[in-house]
Image (spheres, grey):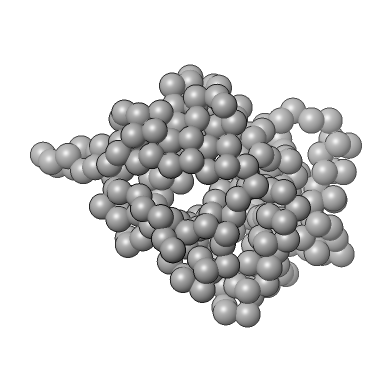
Amino acid sequence: MFELADVAKAYKQSKREVRALDGVSVSIPAGQLVAIQGPTGGGKSTLLQMLGALDRPTSGTVTLAGREISRLRDRQLADIRAREIGFVFQSFNLIPTLTAQENVEMGLAPLGLPARERAERATQALASVGLGERAGHLPGELSGGQQQRVAIARALAKRPKVLLADEPTGNLDEGTRDEIMDLFETLWRQGLTIVLVTHDSSVARRAERRLRIAGGKLTEKD
């Protein structure tokens, strides 16, 4: 699925150079549920951006499903993000004036699908996260956990190869957090590759594999 080889990412900050990633090499096979932990500023978000084709490394290579994505043009990267990678964030990023159904359909807009297919995919995705009966509700009429399920449905509707989640339980209470992790585990057992960033060790412990990044360097956790 993912192959990163000696990936570095450096930023200019005032007069000094900050190395957000420092020689990261890792293989993530298809079908794994991987949790990435580490301190604030340690490189977690930068690593997720590399996996999600949202940024390019300063050096090294990033390969997704046998295709090196680190050197592709912007339009090619946008197409990969639209078709192959699902994103879930800590803030649900739902449009408050649109229903759950409409929010999920909006996520399919870049694919250029006919309206009927968008509607069918959105309906199926909402049903798969247990919100089939809430399709007509606005985000403000849903709980935090339900809003995150809508966000997950939006990611799933495009039928991605991999789901990337950045602190997906960060805004949820403990009980709702566990429900969302139950959902992620179900999706993983159905064959979806999932990589999530989390500060929560109880979330990370539920992953099949745990990685830690600090000072831009990646290590395996037992």
Residue plotted at (87% across, 43% down)? 120
Closest to the observer, 152 or 100: 152
Q: Is residue 184 visible?
A: yes
- Quick one: which residue is furthest to the front in this view? 222
Please, is residue 124 above or below residue 10 in the view?
below
Residue plotted at (52% across, 69% down)? 205
Q: Looking at the rendering, which quadrant does residue 83 occupy?
A: top right
Closest to the observer, 67 or 58: 67
Q: Looking at the rendering, which quadrant does residue 130 occupy?
A: bottom right
Give the number of marks: 0
Image coordinates for residue 114, horizontal then vertical, percent:
84, 30
Residue plotted at (30% across, 48% down)? 217
Q: Is residue 57 visible?
A: no
Q: Looking at the rendering, which quadrant does residue 152 occupy?
A: bottom right
Image coordinates for residue 57, horizontal then vertical, percent:
36, 32
Closest to the observer, 181 or 90: 181
The C terminus, quarter of image? bottom left
Residue 197 is left or right of residue 81, and the answer is left
Residue 114 is left or right of residue 196, and the answer is right
Residue plotted at (66% across, 39% down)? 161
